Image (cartoon, grey):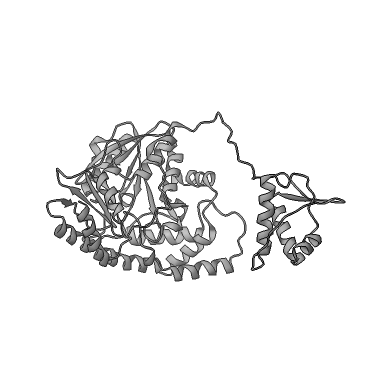
Amino acid sequence: MDLHLNLNHDGGLAEQIYTQLSQQIASGALREGTVLPSSRELAGRLAVSRATVVTAYERLAAHGLIRSRAGIGTMVSARRGSAPVVPVESPLRPRAVWAAEQFDVPDPAMPAAEFNFAPGVPMPADFPFAQWRALLSDQLRTSTEAGYADPAGSGRLRDALARHLGVSRGVRVEAGQLVITTGAQQAFDIAARVLLEPGDTVAVEDPGYRPAYRGFLAYGARVVGVPVDAEGLVVARIPPETRLVYVTPSHQFPLGMPMSESRRTELLAWAARHDAAIVEDDYDSEFRFTGRPLTPLQATDTEGRVLYVGSFSKTLLPALRVGFLGVPWTLAEAARRAKFAADYGTAGHLQAALAEFIEAGDLARHLRRMRRTYERRHDVLMSELHDQFGGVLEPIGSSGGTHTAALLTPGNTDDLALTDRARAEGVLVGALSRWGIERPGPNGFVFGYGAIPADRIRDGLAALRRVI
């Protein structure tokens, strides 16, 4: 056969042979059934080693472009993947909810901003990568577990976590009440699977944490936004038919105030009267700067109505994708089964490394260090907001956490337009209005300080000030 290959002998000969042959097959120059020269013959023609041709042929075969037949030799196969794929016009359609704007997925390829004020994002440089790599390496080297494990999570991690939560937060939970999840989002999903029927009413804070809202909406619940005030969720506005209430009482997202003690008591009493459940997302509770630590709802719940959710995505690193759900004993087995239905369990080596990290006291030390770091960033941010934005922004006071909200004074341009313009100038900041549930949230900004060093905050706010 007349086979034309032009090789550059400076390097990559097997790659060149593969590329040129695959292109000829794709174009139809080499038709299906065409017999190719043997590897020895082609190597002689091209003045290359036979091993080079064998490598190229093996790769073509792996992609289904050639095949060998006894007594015939190597021939061109069907040109898999070479012809344009014509999409089939399927009659299948997703549920209408998946076309809704609130389910748009952020673009992970978006370039990093020079000044990153994104809320809820810790800075990778603050994470002890060297120590974590050593823990993972040790677990991968010594582990003998190769099968499926308990979907609720490793007993060792749940034991360590139960002790840590009891000491650090006063949470009253045993290992058997915990389910290790793929972040907080899966914890919300499991809570919905265990407690809700499609169409049941779920109440969420408005403005509030939209990923939780999306999760309940996707399950098929009727999700209702309930306003918040200076004391947190306005309990009197919860619809009476509500089956589940989602709250962030330690550091309301996105406004930042904690739920008052009286409002917490009122919410627990409301749940008891209406036979409802409460999902407590203890967001940012580890980073309180002033006053005594706030007691979780779960710790004062005497009726077993609170499901407690936490995540290591914001305290350690989002890429870990490890969270947890603490449930009353009456729901423990159902939550375990729901986790099994979802994915059969979180990666074992991650759980083992995290258990070691907690047991050695490294998590507690990391949280103490980050509490000091975040307090400094918080103080710098608040000072600069007052100095640079007097008469333009009104910060909402907060005593902890990893973000602060500020309201634009009346008459200023809407926050969506301003955040778009700021992004073009290298400043990534959240628009407060985006976090509304049933209506746009207040006009303002959400400033996260987890992903920006303290010495960059002033310059970042100066760049934002020029935009405004």
Outermost residue to the right: 71
Which is nearer the eye, 291 or 94?
94
For the point 23% across and 40% down, which residue is it? 234
Q: 60 above or below 50?
A: above
Instruction: Determine if residue 120 is in view.
Output: yes
- Of 292 and 388, which appears nearest the observer? 388
- Residue 107 pos. (x, y %): 42, 49
Q: What residue occupies the far left of the structure in this picture?
A: 391
Looking at the picture, tell me which residue is in the foreground, 361 or 123: 123
**Position of residue 2 measured from the top left corner of the image (x, y, whole percent):** 77, 52
For the point 72% across and 64% down, the residue is 52
Is 283 placed above or below 98 here? below
Q: What count of labels does the image hold?
A: 0
From this view, report whether residue 401 is shown above or below residue 142.
above
Residue 179 appears in view: no
What x and y, as percent, mark residue 123? Answer: 36, 62
343 displayed left or right of 258: right
**Position of residue 129 in the picture relative to residue 113 (left or right):** right
Which residue shows up at 47% across the image and 60% down it? 157
Residue 9 percent location from the top left of the image: 67, 67
Judged left or right of residue 116, residue 385 is: left
Q: Is residue 162 left or right of residue 260?
A: right
